[in-house]
Image (cartoon, rainbow, N blue to C red):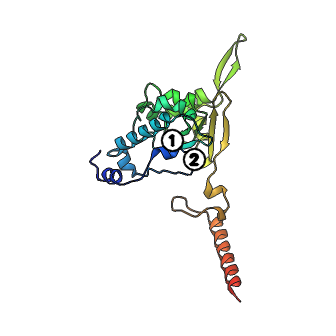
């Protein structure tokens, strides 16, 4: 991968210092934006190495941060196993970092971290479960996340799911806008996920091609634009 033209170009001329991310003054933002196809193939080793170096940097610089550095790993199920991530994840808070990993389903997490995938879930402060089609993931949510103790006969207690896997799948269907949030040592929450193109005012976001705007919202946006133009033209008159 070190011969990849994009890797060579960015490696030969950049001013990125991972130590800046562990600066108490804050304000540094670093993006690694890659084409999905390249991230799954040619550039995956480079991304894994970059993340491994970042984690090691936080470990080697002593102390934490009053305002931790947020590390968002969106392609966790795409780039493969990152060296040292499973061991470092539970300790990142004391190093001054907070990790948010996003993975499509549990089989992908287990594939890359076969001996430690449950540790990511068990050690996480918060896990947000959203819609999907994977049966194993729905079974896990039903039997582990949504399980509760119920009295049985004679007087014993058994673990019973609050929703079956099929009910869980229907509840988490994308069109319904639901999510389940599980917390370490606490009962899970069933919540509504915020969809900007449905729940926010039209003045708070710009349209995009991925989410077709409803006719009523489009009409309101048009009226607001007309009002702004009228106000602007009125203010411009002497």
- Please state which of residues 135 and 129 is positioned toward the viewer in this rendering: 129
Q: Is residue 106 left or right of residue 174?
A: left
Q: Earlier in the sequence, mark 1 or mark 2?
A: 1
**Residue 16 percent location from the top left of the image:** 43, 50
Which quadrant holds the N terminus? top left
Return the mark for residue 52: none
Residue neighbourhood size for the residue with mark 2, other residues' Cα within 10 Å, grouped as few (<14), some (14–19), many (≥20): some
- Please state which of residues 99 and 78 is positioned toward the viewer in this rendering: 99
Which quadrant holds the C terminus? bottom right
- Please state which of residues 49 and 175 is positioned toward the viewer in this rendering: 49
Query: Disc 2 designates what residue?
Result: 174
As drawn, 38 above or below 170: below
Spot the residue most to the left: 3
Provide the secondary structure element on which disc 2 rests.
helix
Quarter holding residue 184:
top right
Q: Residue at x 40, y 51 (%)?
A: 34
- Please state which of residues 102 and 213 is positioned toward the viewer in this rendering: 102
Spot the residue most to the top: 154
**Residue 115 percent location from the top left of the image:** 44, 24
As drawn, 195 above or below 167: below
Quarter holding residue 121:
top right
Q: Residue at x 42, y 37 (%)?
A: 52
User: Can see residue 231?
Assistant: yes
Q: Residue at x 47, y 30 (%)?
A: 86
Return the mark for residue 102: 1
**Residue 15 percent location from the top left of the image:** 42, 53
**Residue 120 percent location from the top left of the image:** 52, 31
Quarter holding residue 218:
bottom right
Measured in 3D between alpha carbons, the distance from the residue under mark 1 to the one under mark 2, in whole angstroms, is: 16 Å
């Amino acid at each position: 991968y070190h011969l990849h033209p994009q890797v060579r170009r960015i490696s030969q001329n950049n001013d990125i210092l991972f130590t800046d991310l562990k600066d108490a003054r804050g304000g540094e933002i670093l993006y690694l934006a890659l084409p999905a196809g390249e991230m799954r193939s040619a550039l995956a080793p480079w991304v894994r190495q970059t993340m491994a170096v970042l984690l090691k940097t936080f470990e080697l610089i002593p102390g934490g941060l009053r305002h931790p550095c947020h590390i968002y790993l969106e392609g966790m199920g795409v780039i493969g196993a990152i060296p040292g991530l499973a061991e470092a994840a539970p300790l990142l808070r004391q190093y001054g970092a907070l990790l948010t990993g996003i993975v499509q389903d549990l089989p992908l997490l287990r594939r890359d971290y076969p001996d430690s995938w449950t540790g990511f879930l068990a050690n996480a402060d918060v896990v947000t479960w959203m819609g999907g089609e994977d049966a194993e993931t729905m079974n896990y949510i039903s039997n582990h996340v949504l399980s509760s103790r119920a009295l049985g006969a004679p007087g014993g207690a058994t673990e019973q799911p609050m929703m079956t896997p099929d009910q869980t799948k229907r509840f988490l269907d994308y069109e319904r806008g639901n999510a389940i949030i599980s917390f370490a040592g606490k009962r899970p929450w069933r919540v509504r996920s915020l969809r900007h193109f449905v729940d926010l005012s039209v003045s708070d976001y710009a349209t995009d091609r991925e989410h077709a705007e409803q006719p009523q919202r489009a009409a309101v946006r048009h009226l607001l634009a007309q009002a702004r133009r009228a106000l602007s033209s009125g203010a411009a008159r002497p």
